[in-house]
Image (spheres, grey):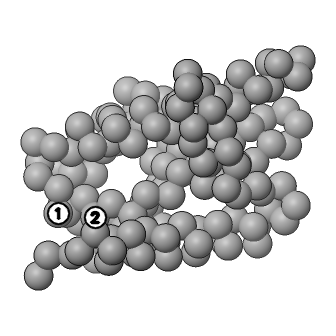
């Protein structure tokens, strides 16, 4: 059975809420959620943002089920996610510089479930390494 757009959106929102809750428990007072940003005329909303004064962290929650993505589309989808993430990072760096701060920014994307297919895992790791971004899965598959 194919998942409807509403079901995908509901699953995505549920994962985002759960991930934010975990981050807020582990980093009370440091985590900002739903942070708005803008870069090159595009508005965005960062899922998880941490600024500890020395380092900024931008994390996106994506509920993509990589097992359902065609192999030839994996790089394309991952790169699309990463371009969005780096637009957000560019926006917060620009804001930081305007305030006179020059903080380092780390970026990453968290997915709910690690793909069981070794090809998919390796392909994702290669793309994320190419961009210098962190890749995490909340649960191992299997």
Quick one: quadrant of the C terminus? bottom left
Q: Is residue 70 above or below residue 43?
A: below
Which residue occupies 59% across, 72% down?
17
Q: Which mark is residue 65?
A: 2
Residue 131 x, y percent position in the rendering:
43, 28
Q: Residue furthest front?
A: 41
User: Residue at image x 89%, y 17%?
Assistant: 100
Element under disc 1: helix
In the drawing, does residue 17 fall left or right of residue 33? left
State the mark number for residue 98.
none
Where is residue 13? Give x, y as percent.
49, 70
Task: Say which residue appears at 58% left-offset and 75% top-offset.
Answer: 18
Horizontal relation, residue 32 to residue 86: left or right:
right
In the rendered view, would you say 141 is above or below 115?
Answer: below
Number of numbered discs overlaid on the protein picture: 2
Q: Quadrant of the N terminus?
A: bottom left
Q: Label 1: how many residues lie within 10 Å, few (<14), some (14-19) or many (20+)?
A: few
The answer to whether residue 140 of the structure is visible from this angle is: no
Task: State yes or no: discs 1 and 2 in contact (Cβ < 8 Å).
Answer: yes
Q: Quadrant of residue 21?
A: bottom right
Label 2 residue SS = loop
CA neighbours of label 2 inside 10 A, class few (<14), some (14 to 19), many (20+): few
**Between marks 1 and 2, how big is the CA–CA gap?**
6 Å
Side of 38 relative to 12 (left or right): right
Residue 7 in view (yes/no): yes
Residue under the image location 74 percent in, 37 percent down: 56
x and y, in percent, of residue 134 in the image:
50, 42
Disc 1 designates what residue? 68
80, above or below 59, in the image? above
User: What x and y, as percent, mark residue 120?
Assistant: 21, 51
Taking the image as shown, residue 50 lies to the left or right of residue 138, namely right
């Amino acid at each position: 059975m194919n998942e409807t757009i509403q079901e995908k959106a509901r699953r995505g929102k549920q994962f985002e809420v759960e991930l934010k809750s975990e981050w807020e428990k582990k980093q009370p007072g440091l985590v900002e959620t739903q942070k708005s940003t803008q870069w090159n005329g595009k508005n965005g909303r960062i899922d998880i943002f941490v600024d500890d004064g020395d380092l900024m962290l931008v994390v996106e929650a994506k509920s993509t089920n990589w097992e359902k993505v065609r192999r030839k589309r994996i790089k394309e989808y991952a790169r699309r996610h990463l371009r969005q993430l780096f637009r957000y990072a560019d926006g917060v760096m620009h804001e930081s510089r305007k305030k006179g701060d020059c903080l380092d920014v780390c970026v990453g994307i968290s997915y709910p479930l690690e793909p069981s297919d070794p090809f998919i895992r390796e392909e994702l790791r290669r793309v994320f390494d190419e961009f210098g971004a962190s890749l995490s899965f909340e649960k191992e598959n299997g």
